[in-house]
Image (spheres, rainbow, N blue to C red):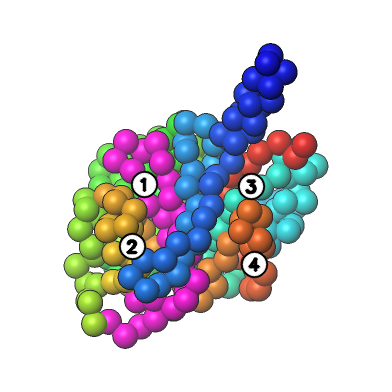
Amino acid sequence: MIWRAALVWLATVGATNAATCEDATFADNAYSICTVDMTTDTLRLFLNGDAGVAYGHFRVLNNALRKNGEKLSFAMNAGMYHDDRSPVGHHIENGKELMRVIPNAGPGNFGLLPNGVLCLRGEQADVIETLRYIDEKPTCEFATQSGPMLVIDGELHPKFLPDGTSRYIRNGVGTSADGKKAVFVISNNTVTFHEFGSLFRDHLKLPQAMYFDGNISRLYAPELGRNDAGFRLGPMIGTVVPAN
């Protein structure tokens, strides 16, 4: 009985330090959803390797982590980036600011205000609207800025229209009110902004969510058999577990 209890305890410990990923359907659209428990999981942002060059691919990042006895349990592309893989907006990694906050409107989805910042600090993750982030000045260990916001205080972005026709593969992140849960989503078919935002608001019941990107959206989720390749990525976000 003691041996059996020990096995159950070990299995439980192993299960609490990795994101949980599943496929789901909502409003006739297919999604892959990965949930991170900030009280047990280790969530980080990644951009450049030791040589100052962007990792670019999940495989490259995983190889670098394994040198330190770690590996990814889940990852996806994070904030938008330029052709040289540098972040378009705010980026903090291990407490060091690599790119300032961009508060003003601009071209493309990033500049479709309001946009937001994902802030990771201790056992807490929060999607915060950019101007609120500037006003509150949270101390983030990791942060990435992207846009537009998908859900703001429980409401969809005001420019999302139910009859919108722009459809892409899209990915993004939402956070719970207490900051203890971060939920990362990628669509498995093309969706509109209204459909994507509605998933976070109506299905996941998350009060804050923001868009990461479209078209180039990628997911690493071994339990779903996903290790998406393609264009080299800029910022990536993922959970880290021991390699063995």
Viewer-proximal residue among 230 and 46: 230
Q: Which residue is mark 4?
A: 228
Q: Which residue is mark 3?
A: 73
Q: CA distance from mark 4 to mark 2?
A: 22 Å
Q: CA distance from mark 1 to mark 2?
A: 13 Å
Residue 199 is tagged as 2
Contact between marks 1 and 2 (CB within 8 A): the answer is no
| Residue 38 appears left or right of 228 | left
Furthest toward the front, the residue is: 1
Q: Which residue is mark 1?
A: 175
Q: Position of residue 106 (x, y in %)?
A: 33, 71
Residue type, mark 4 in image: Asp
Q: Answer above or below: position of 133 versus 81.
A: above
Looking at the figure, which quarter contains the C terminus? top right
Residue placed at 29% from the left, 51% from the top?
Answer: 205
Marked residue nearer the N-terminal end (1 or 4):
1
